[in-house]
Image (cartoon, rainbow, N blue to C red):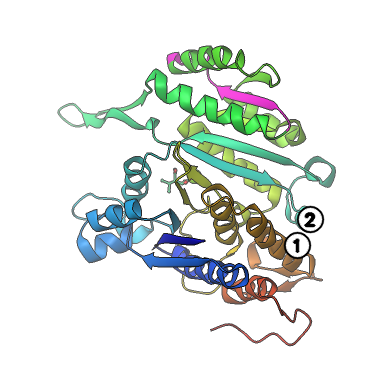
Amino acid sequence: MKKKITVLPGDGIGREIAYGAMDVLQAIGQRFGHEFEMETAEIGGAAIDQEGTPLPEATVALCKQSDAVLLGAVGGPKWDHHPSGVRPEQGLLGIRKALGLFANLRPITAYESLIDASPLKKELVNSVDFMIVRELTGGLYFGKPSERRGENQEIVVDTLYYERHEIERIVEKAFEIAMARRKKLTSVDKANVLESSRMWREIVKEKAALYPEVKVEHILVDAAAMKIIHQPKDFDVIVTENLFGDILSDEASMITGSLGMLPSASLRADGFGLYEPIHGSAPDIAGQDKANPLAMILSAAMMLKYSFGLDAEARIVEQAVNEVLNAGYRTQDIQSDQGNTVVGTKMMTRLVVDRLEENHATSGILTCYL
Ligand code: IPM
Ligand code: MG
């Protein structure tokens, strides 16, 4: 198989982890005879520095010509008060919108070897496995107007805007995902307060008639936040509005022990996708070889599965990550006891790549990857 991948490293730790994921893809390509042609482009703060805009046209064009996109992370305090008023995050929101990536899949999987890294009780988190399906190109993130008003700019407005078809397509996607899993769908809204949520609930009920095998429940977002901590095993697929999904997925990451473990896929109806970890650019640890590369590597695995249909290859990457964790290797964010070996970003990546290469020598002496 021959595929063209655009890699957008972005800012902060995004740069360290994105290059590592490219090595992972290269190793998979070599092992299975696939040709992954990878080209990098700038987005976010790095693009502001180089071109004055967080989303250069050339970046969008390159993504559109490729079969899939891999993204590190964007943002950092350096660009908080840029004279032009632009923010790195506009690049990320812009590329999601420009590519029509409305369905954001965020799997929440508890790794057995990381159970102790979770701040939650073992019996609550072991074997948790659910999927948050977050609407990604509408809602509060994209509603107009979004501005300050009044003579002294004392009034501020953000708008939660949805068109019916935008809710329909994400709900349909979530039902399809539920059909391929344990056939349970939890729709999360705030229907006791928001009109948009009442329409959301109405649409979920309509679509439910087309998927009679799927058990559907509706939960208010505040209650859902509680249940994610209280009974996380009760979830299979959660579908929700853009901002609710953003918040709930960070919360849910604590089940796995670290935000550094969570991958995501942002998909269009035709399967085209952008793959990125759900964590941010972590400027406090950027450039120090401390970042956990596993969310990024697992995002690359999601790309193999969802955009290229390479399920076996994706599973092998996931297995390699599992093996490395089972062997006791940890980055600092998932360190839980003294028996673990704490390694840096490069070494963690190398350990995974080693296991992907056919003749890996896992028990040999590890040389640090430069
Ligand atoms: C995420 C991030 C982004 C979002 C930020 C960086 C704009 O938090 O992907 O979850 O809010 O969508
Ligand atoms: Mg977020």
State whether residue 34 appears in this view: yes
Residue 260 image offset from top left, x and y in percent: 59, 57
> Disc 1 residue type?
Ser
Disc 2 on helix, strand or loop?
A: helix
Q: Which residues are magenta?
A: 182-195
Which residue is more in the foreground, 46 or 122? Answer: 46
Tags 2 and 1 touching, CB below 8 Å: yes
| Mark 2 closeness class: few <14, some 14–19, many ≥20 residues within 10 Å | some
Looking at the rendered structure, which numbered label has been put on residue 336?
1
* Residue tagged 2: 116
| Mark 1 closeness class: few <14, some 14–19, many ≥20 residues within 10 Å | some
Residue 249 higher or lower than 59, as above or below: above
| Pointer 2 or 1: first along the chain | 2
The reply to whether the magenta stretch includes residue 185 is yes
Query: Alpha carbon of mark 2 to alpha carbon of mark 1: how far?
Result: 6 Å
Which residue is more in the foreground, 234 or 185? Answer: 185
